[in-house]
Image (cartoon, helix red, strand yellow):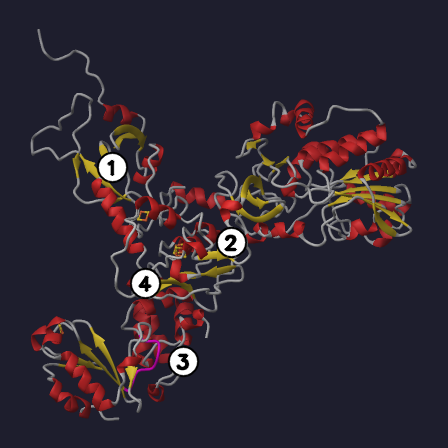
Amino acid sequence: MNTLENNVASPTTPGEQHFPPFVASDDIVALADERITHYPESKLSAVLPLIHIVQHKHGFVSKEAITWIAEKLEIEPMKVVSVVTFYPGFRQSAPGKFHYRVCRTLSCAMAGSYELMDQICEITNIDRSQLSHHHPIVVSPCGNYSVEFAECLASCGTAPVCLVNDDFHENIKPENAQDLINKYQP
Amino acid sequence: MSDTPTTTKLLPKDEAAEKGLVNVQIDGNWIQVPRGTRMIEACKIAEKEVPHYCYHPKLTSPGNCRMCLVQMGMPPRPAPGADPVFGDDGYQEIGWMPRPVIACANTVAENMGIKTSGDLVEKTREGVMEFLLINHPLDCPICDQAGECSLQEFSVEHGRGQSRFVEDKIKKPKNVDIGPRINLDDERCIMCSRCIRFMDEVADDAVLGFSERGTHTTVTCHPDRRLDSNYGMNTIDLCPVGALTSKDFRFQMRVWFLKETKSIDVNCGTGCNTTVWTRGNQVYRVTPRRNDDVNSEWMPDSHRLAFHEVQGENRLTDPMIKVDGKHEITDWNTAINSAADALKEFESSEVAIIASARQTNEELFLTQGLADTIGTENVATVERTGEPDGKLISADRNPNTNGAKLLLGDSTAKLATIKDGLNDGSIKALIVLNEDLFEEANFSHDDLAGAELIISSHIIANKTAHASDIVLPGASFAEKRGSMVNVTGRLQRLNQAIQPSGNSKEDWEIIRDLILAINGESNDMYMIEDVVKMIAENVTEFNGLTFSKIGDQGTQLIETGVEIPLLTKERERAAAGIIVG
Ligand code: SF4
Ligand code: FES
Ligand code: FES
């Protein structure tokens, strides 16, 4: 694949089974249109919220989604690519059905978040050596789980902490990793 | 008696304020510059170089490379109730700030001090250079930019000569096919964002952008929106390093072997100012040259690459005469004398000249002289129009329409008369100078059936050359001197960069020789300056002009009222303070 295609490519992952390809559903269009009204000066400012909407609904930001956002906001698609690739929180490939974001900032790191990550990976058979800067998440072979380190999730007092999709979990000792997996069964 | 003098001398600050200026001390010397001047421009006025990458006066200033850091100082704020204290020289003392500021995006203020050297500034530059070089390959010997790379230059001057970076370098994409004419080597990019801003602000085609973040930041574009704008190649000139390179020029020649000749573009009426880069008798590249009254600092890709045409296989290099339907190479004397003899076979009114608004003023003046010598009034030029691009490319694709108007009068209407004359048999001989009758002037072979004699002068072997009885090979824009008048009425100069190819000849000499051969009288035209002198004496608008007076930036000859859209936009942006201009 050529270098430029890489900017918008979505390498296949086992997580894809849970995320159908992007379509601009009525649902998404309505959410986007509403968001755009928040920025009367320049639609460009709506690029970040629109990417969030897409990722939330579709799990990741595909080339088709980038094109749709650009057209919706009447901006160059490269502007969308810049924002998507700037934030590690935006993904360009499908995560697992349950995406685990383990905090690795100081308090959590000291309270064992790296061990927690190792435990989660061991239980779900995730091989983190596949990580790259451009694609910072790894998906389990079954496609149900994926992991990512996150920076401070603003709950340092209850370290280590972890986000699973939109649920927040505190005080997760590494030895309790299995419980955290058990809570999320496909 | 009182100590107070009766007349108070104005302080420098008040003196300057009256003129809208401010006093700035640069490396110890006080100068006055207009209020609102960027610090970096003030330093330029003081002839102090401030190294910089991201700053470009024609683009917005993001201040992201930090190369232009200087030390700044302002007078300390007086204590409450106290008045500012002025020294004997009328200036306040400067309190130097302990940290550097960027000179590119900050403006000067009254009594400001700037230091472009000294311990703080030098240490800062070393630090910035070291950072810029962290991920940059150190392989200048194989880089095409070597010799014209600001990174190379500034690192020699301001770098610490050694890196302390022991971690792994980030590897970025190499040899990226970012557009049809441009190649990108991301490893060399120093993220100045000049290319991105140019495409957005000047080319109106914002296809470039940064992807990733921090040390991984990469210039790139969306795969469906590549860098294919007709102004894209300007990013190559803008790029301070060897990241963006021209597919046409890369690895063809080391720049230090090339000779630079200042010239102008001849592909449309704008006449973008150019530099022609040559070695031996070959043009290697053409780049735009700054002229704020013509092309700012840019030019369209299509015009930049047009020089290849005159170096192609089709180039005419020898005079030729048609014998039994086949062109045979001959020498200049034979060709010119045969042309003169052949012309004498016709009545004056049977001869027509199709001249060209692609000719220089000197050639046009002599063309009129040729018509007078022959005694014909049939002199026409061919209109050449196209879509204007709203930037630099003018609807008028002839480079010297205004020159042709001044020197030949309104000659475009005569083309139809000549065509009619050929068809009704009143015109039998044609002299064609630098035009193609078929493709450009819309003549058909039927139209030419009545032409018993065609003498023509061209650069490349076009259809007209094939149809001619005598072919006189002329010189390309890079091979001759001369002047042209652009759409705005600006008189500009072509300079000779290389010798005419093979046995071809500068066009003014061809026409002069033809005149000589026809009337048999000697004249005083030995050098092109002699022709310029005659034009200055005979054509009012050119009174008093010489080549050297035209200068490298040209001179306004007439006012046509035509504006160049790209300049109009640039001036608006400068007036609004968005760019320096
Ligand atoms: S490619 Fe060149 S002009 Fe563009 S950001 Fe990089 S160094 Fe600057
Ligand atoms: S360090 Fe983990 S929540 Fe703050
Ligand atoms: S030139 Fe001033 S920050 Fe780049």
Per the rendering, the mark at residue B231 is: 2
Task: Decide which of B319, B369 is in the foreground and name it.
Answer: B319
User: Label 2, label 3: how many angstroms apart (C-alpha)?
Assistant: 35 Å
Q: Which amino acid does label 2 sit on?
A: Tyr
Q: Which of marks 4 and 2 is in front?
A: 2
Left-right relation of B458 to A31: right
Q: Where is residue A125 in the image (x, y as percent from the top left)?
A: 26, 89
Residue underneath mark 3: A23
In the image, residue A127 sits, relative to residue A37, either above or below, namely below
**Residue type of the residue flagged with mark 4:** Ser
Relative to B438, is B178 above or below? below
Would the CB of label 3 be found within 8 Å of ligand 1?
Answer: no
Query: Distance of mark 1 from mark 4, alpha carbons?
Result: 39 Å
- The answer to whether the residue bearing label 1 lies less than 8 angstroms from the nearest atom of ligand 3 is no
**Separation of disc 3 and disc 4 at Cα?**
22 Å
Give the labeled residue for mark 1.
B115
The type of residue carrying mark 1 is: Lys
Element at label 1: strand
Identify the subunit bearing mark 3. A
Where is residue B390 drawn, in percent x and y? 53, 50
Numbered disc 3: secondary structure: loop
For mark 4, what is the residue?
A45
